[in-house]
């Protein structure tokens, strides 16, 4: 589920995927250094990362929610078209150690690249990541 633009952990620290060279290697960072997929891993999603991406902390709806976040964005309709004037808040809740988008019933979002991919699928826009 990796794509160009995703952030991953490498031996040298976080790096953005610039090119997928084959099934076992990726080119990462501004210098496009090649890393072996076996030595790379996901970046766990944290409150600090969410806040740096533009999410804001909002009040939890119930006691089972540890944290709740909101980000204002445009959402695409069922045909993949951005709806004019459809700026709305997406809500992300943290429950049982995992994150979930409230509006869309999908499995947990545990890693930065999963958040990037789902955000892009919902909005057609890249999520600004500041690591």
Image (cartoon, helix red, strand yellow):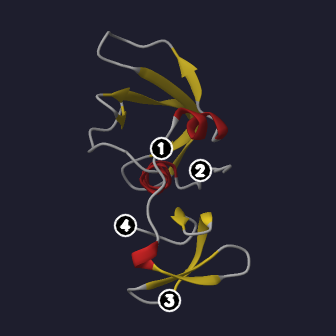
Q: What quarter of the picture does the N terminus occupy?
A: bottom left
Q: Secondary structure at mark 3?
A: loop
Tell which circle, 2 or 4, labels the residue nearer the N-terminal end: 4
Vertical relation: 40 (above or below) 124:
below
Is the residue under label 1 in contact with that under label 3 (CB below 8 Å)? no
Is residue 85 visible to the viewer in this orientation of the structure? no
Q: Which mark is residue 56?
A: none
Distance between mark 3 and mark 1 Cα atoms: 26 Å
The one nearer the camera, 33 or 113, is 33
Tell which circle, 4 or 1, labels the residue nearer the N-terminal end: 4
Q: Position of residue 95 (x, y in %)?
A: 32, 27
> Image point 33% across, 32% down: which residue?
97
Q: Which mark is residue 127?
A: 2
Q: Position of residue 127 (x, y in %)?
A: 59, 50
The one nearer the camera, 91 or 47, is 47
> Image point 66% across, 39% down: which residue?
52
Tell which circle, 3 or 1, labels the residue nearer the N-terminal end: 3
Q: Residue furthest front?
A: 11
Distance between mark 4 and mark 3 Cα atoms: 15 Å
The one nearer the camera, 47 or 40, is 40
Tell which circle, 1 or 2, labels the residue nearer the N-terminal end: 1
Q: Which mark is residue 1?
A: 4
Q: Which mark is residue 21?
A: 3
For this view, does 7 lie left or right of residue 92? right
Q: Which mark is residue 45?
A: 1
């Amino acid at each position: 589920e990796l794509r160009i633009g995703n952030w991953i952990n490498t031996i040298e620290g976080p790096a953005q995927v610039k090119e997928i060279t084959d099934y076992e290697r990726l080119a990462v960072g501004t210098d496009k250094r090649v890393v072996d997929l076996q030595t790379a891993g996901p970046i766990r999603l944290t409150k600090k990362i969410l806040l740096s991406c533009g999410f804001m902390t909002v009040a939890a709806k119930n006691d089972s929610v540890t944290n709740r976040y909101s980000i204002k964005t445009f959402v695409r309709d069922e045909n993949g078209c951005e709806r004019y004037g459809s700026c709305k808040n997406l809500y992300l809740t943290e429950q049982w150690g995992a994150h979930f988008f409230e509006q869309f019933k999908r499995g947990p979002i545990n890693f930065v690249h999963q958040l990037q991919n789902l955000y892009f699928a919902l909005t057609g826009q890249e999520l600004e990541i500041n690591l």
